[in-house]
Image (cartoon, coloured by chain):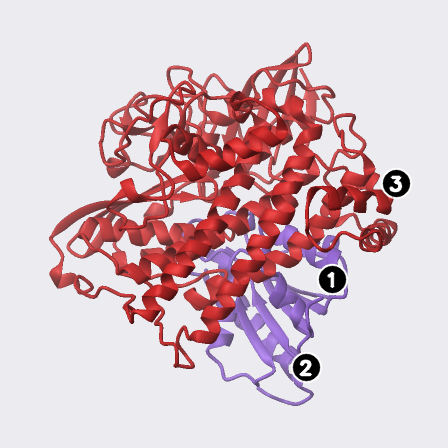
Chain colours: A purple, B red
């Protein structure tokens, strides 16, 4: 079993080459540039995959930021507390082999940290590009603010 | 006549769609279609060639660093940069890491459940599983109590109603042939592999600074070695890498290889199914005296035609007559017309979708039906991947490759022809991992020798500055990625990228037929295969998964919404 650390891991998921699909990674890169408390860790998870399993298991709490292909308007943000792999919204298939399998394995192994998911709805038809659209750029700012609330709650004090 | 649609093919989400036409219980024709658009090249044009590795590494979360490695090789080839020996060894160690990580994860987590029936695990006698485990391996976790605990874990998981990772299987299909005890062994090692893979990727973090997207550098590697320095690759970290290699040797030799051989023993009929194309291409890899000297690569470069193991044909990826990409059945336009073949140096990415409006029932195969272009070597279709690597190496007389291949054939008591099959492909991947971990140990020993000799330079700065570059240059980076032959072609003009084309393994294997009607590897491997139950086309899944298909890099943009595994309808 992996040893658990007193740590909140902020994990940004997404494909940086697919425009808004990369919003999770853009958000975590922004958080990486802030001076967060020592018990907070940031990780650019790219498009997911088994590589991330250990970091996810080691944390006491996990905040995942990801794009979702949900039915609501692009830029909408859902905050969820998934307990099983099937509780996650349809994420974009550009993640391919990575995320679904990773989450299934993560939940199969059990004894997991508490997971908070910040899912940002995007238009699933994305052109190739490394920039966010204005709507999603704004959603990324909101997502960062939500993560900072999670940071405060985890540390038991006001940080931001 | 029935038509089976499998979309997506990958166990997890994917973008590969295959349609198979079945007559009298056998596949008579097959269509492999990549349903995403390719066009990464467009992002790269105009950028600094020294940054390309970071961008191409983002193509896929699975084989990130293969693309980064191939990219720095392409730039170095264009500019004539030779990297220091220590950097070459570190790159090799990182590449071996991807190779074995990818193969183990593919086998246990994406392919084993095509052969191992999870549901039957609950019926197994753990004591008998223990006896089987101890008879095939010296791996220490082999007691009845251990297997009993695994069985309880699976029971608890199934009882919770959360099938999770096991949700997609055709459990109970009569094609599952393993006794419950061997199924339990397989599932136990599925869990062990999950734990082991967490360790081996740390090699990337140590040498590449981070994972899953480790850092690369044109001219070398971006890490410094200093045995006494806290922030460098020091004695402690080198020792740690040594221990990770030991764990990998144990896992590959005591778990992966014995499991594959044990499972293969129950499925020998699959040694004559799924062979497909008779041609195999390997670019060769694991340089020992520099990337410019393939004659000293651990894995030889070449082509084998018509399964003739007495001849290896030389490959020159820069020769514009050797490798061409066709679009006869792909949704693109070429300026020179639909029948033209373009060498990747002159590659064009001009989309022209003429397929049905999604969602649709079936593709119109007489026309264009894929976003993947069709690459050919000397106008011949080629299979690429671990099997091709071993076939080319075997034909080249490579003693390491011959030894592991002959040993496995002997243990299974099957002839060499068994290699050319679905089973052979899956076994070849395991043997490829065995070779990779063996070489990893060797490269690590050589790295320690370099450190002892104080040869710790990891970067050649001579041509770092663009003012030292010619006005125009072109180069190719070739890699044997886990899934096979990977090429990046770059053209540099006035210090910027003028063209960049990727020809990835799944382009070779998963492309549509060419204008002459020659099938590529996926389609060829399915034709002739039996399909016992049209509603549960397990045979198709087994053969396609034996290639380890990954479409993230062969095509890049998702278009129609994915449907679930095993869609089916009759015509």
Tell me the distance, in whole angstroms, between the alpha carbons under discs 3 and 2: 44 Å
Q: Earlier in the sequence, mark 1 or mark 2?
A: 1
Q: Tags 3 and 2 in contact by the CB under 8 Å rule?
A: no
Looking at the image, is B167 positioned above or below residue B542?
below
Q: Which residue is mark 1?
A: A82
Q: Residues within 10 Å of mark 3 (few under 14, many from 20)?
A: few
| Quarter of the rendering occupied by the N terminus of chain B | top right
List x then y, in percent, for residue B459.
26, 65
Looking at the image, is A80 positioned above or below residue B280?
below
| Image point (42%, 17%), residue name | B518
| Image point (54%, 52%), residue name | B101
List x then y, in percent, for residue A85.
72, 55
List x then y, in percent, for residue A41.
57, 76
Q: Are marks 3 and 1 on the same chain?
A: no
Q: Is residue B555 left or right of residue B343?
A: right
Q: Which residue is mark 3?
A: B123
Q: In what element is the residue under mark 3?
A: helix
Q: Which residue is mark 2?
A: A154
Q: In what element is the residue under mark 2?
A: helix
Query: Chain ID for label 2?
Result: A
């Amino acid at each position: 079993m992996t040893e658990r650390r007193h740590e909140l891991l902020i994990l940004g998921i997404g494909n940086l080459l697919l425009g808004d699909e990369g919003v999770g990674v853009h958000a975590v890169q922004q958080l990486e540039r802030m001076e967060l408390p020592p018990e907070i860790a940031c990780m650019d998870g790219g498009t997911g995959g088994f590589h991330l399993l250990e970091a996810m298991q080691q944390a006491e709490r996990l905040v995942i930021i990801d794009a979702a292909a949900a039915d609501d308007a692009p830029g909408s943000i859902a905050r969820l507390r998934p307990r099983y792999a099937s509780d996650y919204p349809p994420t974009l298939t550009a993640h391919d082999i990575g995320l679904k399998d990773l989450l299934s394995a993560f939940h199969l192994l059990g004894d997991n940290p508490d997971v908070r998911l910040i899912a940002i709805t995007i238009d699933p038809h994305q052109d190739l590009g490394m920039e966010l659209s204005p709507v999603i750029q704004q959603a990324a700012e909101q997502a960062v603010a939500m993560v900072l609330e999670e940071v405060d709650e985890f540390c038991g004090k006001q940080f931001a | 006549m029935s038509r089976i649609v499998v979309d997506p093919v990958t166990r997890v989400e994917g973008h590969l769609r295959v349609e198979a036409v079945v007559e009298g219980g056998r596949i008579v024709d097959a269509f492999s279609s990549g349903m995403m658009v390719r066009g990464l090249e467009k992002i790269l044009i105009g950028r600094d060639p020294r940054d390309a590795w970071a961008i191409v590494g983002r193509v896929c979360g699975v084989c990130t660093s293969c693309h980064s490695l191939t990219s720095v090789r392409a730039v170095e080839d264009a500019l004539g940069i030779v990297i220091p020996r220590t950097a070459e060894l570190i790159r090799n160690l990182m590449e071996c890491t991807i190779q074995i990580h990818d193969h183990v994860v593919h086998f246990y987590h994406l392919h084993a459940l095509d052969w191992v029936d999870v549901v039957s695990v609950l019926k197994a006698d753990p004591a008998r599983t223990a006896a089987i485990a101890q008879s095939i391996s010296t791996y220490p976790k082999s007691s009845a109590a251990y297997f009993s605990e695994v069985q309880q874990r699976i029971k608890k998981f199934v009882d919770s109603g959360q099938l999770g990772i096991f949700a997609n299987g055709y459990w109970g299909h009569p094609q599952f042939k393993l006794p419950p005890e061997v199924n339990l062994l397989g599932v136990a090692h599925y869990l062990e592999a999950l734990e082991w893979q967490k360790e081996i990727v740390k090699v990337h973090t140590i040498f590449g600074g981070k994972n899953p997207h480790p850092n690369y550098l044109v001219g070398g590697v971006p890490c410094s070695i200093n045995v006494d320095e806290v922030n460098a690759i020091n004695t402690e970290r080198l020792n740690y890498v040594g221990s990770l290699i030991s764990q990998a040797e144990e896992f590959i030799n005591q778990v992966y290889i014995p499991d594959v051989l044990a499972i293969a023993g129950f499925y020998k009929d699959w040694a004559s199914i799924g062979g497909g194309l008779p041609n195999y291409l390997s670019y060769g890899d694991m340089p020992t005296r520099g990337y410019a000297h393939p004659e000293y690569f651990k894995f030889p470069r070449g082509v084998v035609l018509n399964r003739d193991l007495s001849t290896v044909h030389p490959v020159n990826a820069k020769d514009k007559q050797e490798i061409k990409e066709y679009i006869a059945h792909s949704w693109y336009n070429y300026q020179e017309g639909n029948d033209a073949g373009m060498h990747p140096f002159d590659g064009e990415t001009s989309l022209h979708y003429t397929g049905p409006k999604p969602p649709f029932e079936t593709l119109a195969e007489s026309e264009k039906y894929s976003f993947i272009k069709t690459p050919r070597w000397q106008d011949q279709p080629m299979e690429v991947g671990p099997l091709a690597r071993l076939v080319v190496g075997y034909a080249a007389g490579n003693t390491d490759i011959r030894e592991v291949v002959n040993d496995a054939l002997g243990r299974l008591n099957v002839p060499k022809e068994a290699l050319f099959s679905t089973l052979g492909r899956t076994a070849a991947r395991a043997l490829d991992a065995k070779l990779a971990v063996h070489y990893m140990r060797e490269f690590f020993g050589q790295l320690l020798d370099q450190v002892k000799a104080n040869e710790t330079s990891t970067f050649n700065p001579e041509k770092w500055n663009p003012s030292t570059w010619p006005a125009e240059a072109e180069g190719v980076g070739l890699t044997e990625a886990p899934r096979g032959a990977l090429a990046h072609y770059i053209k540099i003009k006035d210090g910027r990228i003028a063209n960049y084309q990727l020809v990835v393994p799944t382009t070779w294997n998963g492309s549509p037929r060419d204008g002459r009607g020659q099938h590529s590897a996926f389609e060829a491997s399915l034709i002739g295969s039996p399909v016992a139950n049209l509603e549960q086309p397990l045979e198709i899944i087994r053969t396609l998964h034996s290639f380890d298909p990954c479409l993230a890099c062969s095509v890049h943009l998702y278009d129609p919404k994915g449907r679930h595994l095993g869609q089916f309808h009759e015509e």
